Amino acid sequence: MSIRRICTATAVGLISTIGALAQTGPRLTFEVAVIKVPAPTAQNSSAATGIKVTAQQVTVGRTSLLRLTEIAYGIGNAHIEGPAWLRNPQSANDVRLFDIAAKLPPGATPAQVPQMLQALLENRFKLTARKTSKLADTYALVVGKNGPKFPKKEPSGDQPSNLDFTSGPNGMQIMGVKISAGANGGTRMEASSPSGLIEILSKAVLPTPVIDKTGLNGSYDIKFEIPPFDRNLSSADGSIAPADLQEWTRISLFAAMEKIGLKMEKQKNPVETLVIDHLEKAPTEN
């Protein structure tokens, strides 16, 4: 696995972010939100992709409706049921990406952004959806018999938001997890909590949901590496079968977790599912 491969997975919406929040009062909305379709020449460019949250604004770059729905409801795309075109586009109109610049209301926090995105999808894309729960195959992240092999640490004031995706010369920050180049072409991951680690494992790397059953609270210094893909598993023409890559990734991750005192166990657990009853392909005008 390489940083490029993980970045590609992020761009096409294989990751998600923090769970949708329980609402105890009127749902917040953006003060103003401008939605644009990137120029055709920019659809596959290296332009900014994903979401960035500051004190005053949310900026979304080249992001699909499926990905926006993931962010808004905190549900991985494998557990979003909706119109066929959302997951299996048949035309250019189905795969359009969107740029969004939205102003936060005074006093709003990054943790409240998902509910504002829900309101935006409902108001501008006419989304109607409902949540259900289904028993599904999952992996449970648990502590190994000898305990965790990473230290606890004092949380710093500059912890990255679980909503942020940033990329630079020293690696990427995705959902509070730093991803950078590891030894011998591998990939190094650094997380400050099991929850951030699970976001990456469950929504960027593994196709199966991962449930946190570590019982670990607070901030930690979690670091591990995934070795580069074994090219000997490639076909004669150098191509890699998706199933082979998936299985290799699973084995590599399980081994990496064991090295830091964690373990992945296969379990049946309730998994939240979002059922979309209606969604427009294009937003109402700004």
Image (cartoon, grey):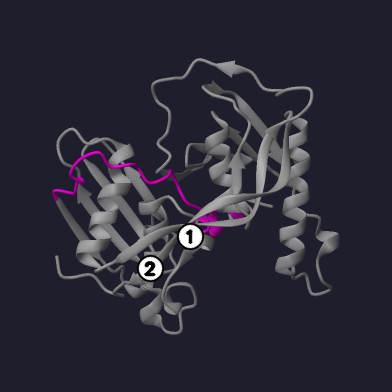
Q: Residues within 10 Å of mark 2 (few under 14, many from 20)?
A: some
User: At which x and y percent is residue 173?
Assistant: 49, 40
- Is 221 inside the magenta-drawn segment? no
At 51% from the left edge and 61% from the top edge, which residue is drawn? 79
Quarter-wise, where is residue 191 in the image? Answer: top right
Crowd around label 1: few <14 · some 14–19 · many ≥20 (10 Å): many
The residue carrying mark 2 is 276
Label 1, label 2: how far apart the Cα atoms are: 17 Å
Q: Is residue 29 magenta?
A: yes
Q: Bounds of the magenta span?
A: 5-31
Instruction: Give x and y (percent) for residue 156.
Output: 44, 20
User: Which residue is outermost to the top?
Assistant: 154
Q: What residue is shown with label 1? A: 13
Does the magenta stretch mainly form a helix, a strand or a loop?
Answer: loop
Which amino acid type is shown beneath numbered disc 2?
Ile
Q: Which mark lies nearer to you, 1 or 2?
A: 2
In the visual, does 228 lie left or right of 22?
right
